[in-house]
Image (tube, coloured by chain):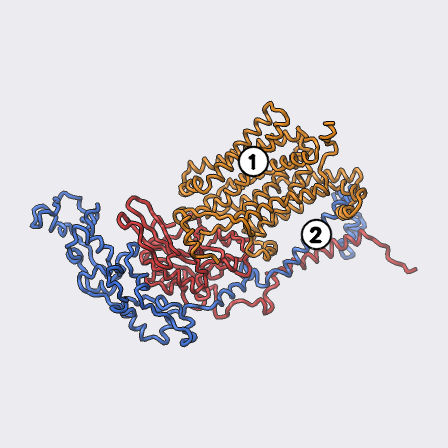
Amino acid sequence: MITIPKKVLASWSTTDYNLTDFVLNANINIVMRQTRIPKQLIPPIILFAVAAMALIIARQLLVPKTFGKYGFYRAAAVDEIASHKMVYAGYQVCSECHDDILQTKQQGSHKGLACETCHGAAAAHAEAPDQSVPSIPKGRDYCQLCHAYNPSRPTGFPQIIPETHNPGKACITCHNSHSPQLKPEAEECSTCHGGIANQKVVSFHAALPCARCHAVPKEHLLEPRLVKAAKPTTRSLCGECHAVGVDSPSDIPRIDLANHGGNVVCWECHYPHFPEAR
Amino acid sequence: MIDVTRIAAELPNVTGYIYPNEYELHWGILIVVYPYLTGLVAGAFILASLERVFKVKALQPVYRLSLLTAFSFLLVAPLPLLAHLGHPERFSEMFLTPHTESAMAMFGFVYAWYLMVVLLLEIWFDYRRDIVFWANEKRGFVRYVYRFLTFGASDISDAAIRFDDKIGRVITIIGIPSAFLLHGYVGFIFGSVKANPWWSSVLMPIVFLFSAIVSGIAIVLFIYMVSTIFRWKQVNMPCLNKLAELLFYAILVDFSLEALDFIQRLYESEESISILSQMISSRLFISLIISQIILGTLIPLVALAAARFGRIPDEMRRIMYLVAAVLVQVGIFSTRWNVVIGGQLFSKSLRGLTFYKLELFGLEGLLTSGALIVLPFVILFILVKLFSPWDREEVDVKSSKA
Amino acid sequence: MTDQAPKMPRRDFLDTAVRKLPAWLLVFKLLNPAELLGDGDSTDVGNPKYDPTQHDYAMGVNVHKCIGCGRCADACKTENNVPRDPIYFRTWVERYITSTDGETQVDSPNGGINGFPPAQKESGILRTFFVPKLCNHCSKPPCVQVCPVGATFQSRDGVVLVDETYCVGCRYCIQACPYGARYLHPIKKIADKCTFCYHRVVKGHVPACVEVCPTQARVFGEAGQQSSPLRRFLRFNDVTVLKSWLNTKPKVYYAGADGEVR
């Protein structure tokens, strides 16, 4: 409860408002006036005030200047990170001097392969071409990182089995790394489809050429992902050997085309590259 | 730099698949020691508050001891954190630019609040009369220490003492949720990590808190018994019985909570259950089944129940209490180990387990951790010498025998 | 004796408390770092030619195209001077092999840098593929959330970076990352991770891993740019992100990531 003496009230209308006088003259009825603040509370209050001030002053002095400018971080850090030196130059830089090789590469299967993937980081070479010369992988090991047969690689990626594919010979003896050509002969499907070829070669269908069942347009060899070979669309293709009553070797298993397997094509259930596997 | 050949030879110790960066454990034994120490702080303080606020009179002999224990452990608690940092010299950043979204940053302030507002104030107000008394009576260098610690407030009239008492109660009342916050926060630091299915749990702060209470009661029981016996005084049996009883109930609650977590995990059988079961049965078998459950929970439960509620002579009781208190410490330390180390032993791909190689020497070594656990006892020893917490009515063992 | 004004200690105290102290507190409140900036060359940051607010970087990974050659992991270590030990990686390649009995095995020998040795068994493989992994530069990064000092942050162009002079090395961010993308740099003793080769992208280049990928399995670009390889990638592929249920909103999008990929 606050009671205000009349003379203070009167003074408000004529003089400037003086907060100090108000506080001193008002009759404020709170517990504090009756029981004085015990002296033992003063030291803790002072110590806390000092600690808080110390923290505020420390913040003032020690927090980096750019902190908080764009978010809760030191904005200058972004510039520091952005100013690191590049170690890889990027293929555009290579083409400034080696454009002829780039043009050659664009015609072959390695057109998507950056120069530095095989020749290593070349920013230093771009800066000072004579002082830092990129390496040229000439043995068999480096090409195998991509082209050695590994079943986990996506189907259609050209792979060889190093132990049987011209052992001992350097890859560049036969292949031009800047413009590797794919041979267009029929059985070279296994160059890219090694996994399938490996399975087929030990299966009942080993003697069947790929083209027996797949129609392969010639563009497929140039742009494999854009122009694909066709899968058989009818059951009658398989029926040419497997239907009851056709003229084919007697040890081939026969089925009744009309009743066997509903109306889906055969390869929805069977795996023609390795038909033994159910 | 790490020897690549050694790593290549050691990688076979990895079971299954781990992300390559997960090979190294990042929070090692120092981060096991840290929640162990803060847990003791919270537990000891809760014990003190039981006497002060909830008027459990039997605990009077250990009231001041609990406060001093909490203080000693609280002083040492930041040391393992500091030692663990990659750049300890930058630690001030946590106070200057604390990220308010980060539980770790906010914990710095919870710790500072608890130290300054709760513990220091409570101890000062409780001891103030004695400090003034000692400032007048004692001789030598300590006299100046006491005079400094009065901070000029040397009024020890009845009214002043009554005020001290009143404000002490207020501080303790504020202190109870603060103590809960102190160690619950540590639980939250782990429990809020959604990337880790071993840690990520709503129960984590609760389990941390109750295991803290268990360890705090046990450590005060241990310190009280050992120090009283060493001073050739008679142990106050009602107090000790009360401590044992409280410890028993605390372990019961803590065990129930952890069993609940375990049962629920098994029942829900969510994706991580397979790798976690593998981890428990291989990497964590000794520290979880043997050390935490059998040695640290079941045996103390039986021992405390038998000793407290059974008809056993006092000498035997004391031995069983002491053994139980020590086993509880082993158990709670194992709990911290299982949480911190266990959470990093399995891969976040849920496909493999790595291993933790505990060094003997070095900043992250067993010896350093041992020293950090011993250091609070050293500090407590000094504090007890300066600020005697003992009851004046204590009975001398020697004189009663004579 | 001169007529001195009578001492009024209470009046003086209240005078200070009520009039002067609030003024002091106000001054101190203004003296905080964020408000002090805006003047002085020492707080000038940024390259005037590059406006980060016009960019939002993201990446696409096509699992169907990855051949597991490991050139990306190797180039990353070269470009960013990452220690060569087999336990520190900013990016790595994993191989998944699902056998016909339903079990899936994953491995990543030296992050895939030296290629992959032949699989344990070749028969009985149902599906197998390679998955490159890296920091996902999440839109809601849990690592940034838990950093106690603001040393790791999301830049205005969507890249999560680490301030190596500010990081205290507490390793909370490493614990918080669900993808295992972070490690503690053994020499600098700070948290480190993929930066999308920030020093390259601000100059208009692509990250080193994208540069050297032979099959263009990695696609880098701007999430907001209309005609770009990344936009095409996002339009034509069924993209997923890793651990989507954790709500980190990763910005590395995977096409062809099998359900077994974690």
Is A93 positioned to the left or the right of A265 in the image?
A: right
Question: What residue is shown at x 16% (from left), y 55% (from top)?
Answer: A213
State the residue position of label 1. Answer: B327
Local SS, label 2:
helix
How far apart are the alpha carbons under marks 1 and 2?
Answer: 44 Å
What kind of residue is marked 1?
A: Leu
Local SS, label 1:
helix
Identify whether C160 is placed above or below A259: below
Q: Which chain carries label 1?
A: B
The chain in blue: A
Cβ atoms at labels 1 and 2 below 8 Å apart: no
Q: Can residue B299 be seen in this view?
A: yes
Quadrant assignment, res C94: bottom left
x and y, in percent, of residue B146 in the image = 76, 46
The chain in red: C
Question: What residue is shown at x 72% (from left), y 55% (from top)?
Answer: C21
For chain B, what colour was chosen?
A: orange
**Mark 1 Cα-neighbour bin, 10 Å: few <14, some 14–19, many ≥20:** many
State the residue position of label 2. Answer: A49
Is B273 positioned to the left or the right of B327 in the image?
A: left
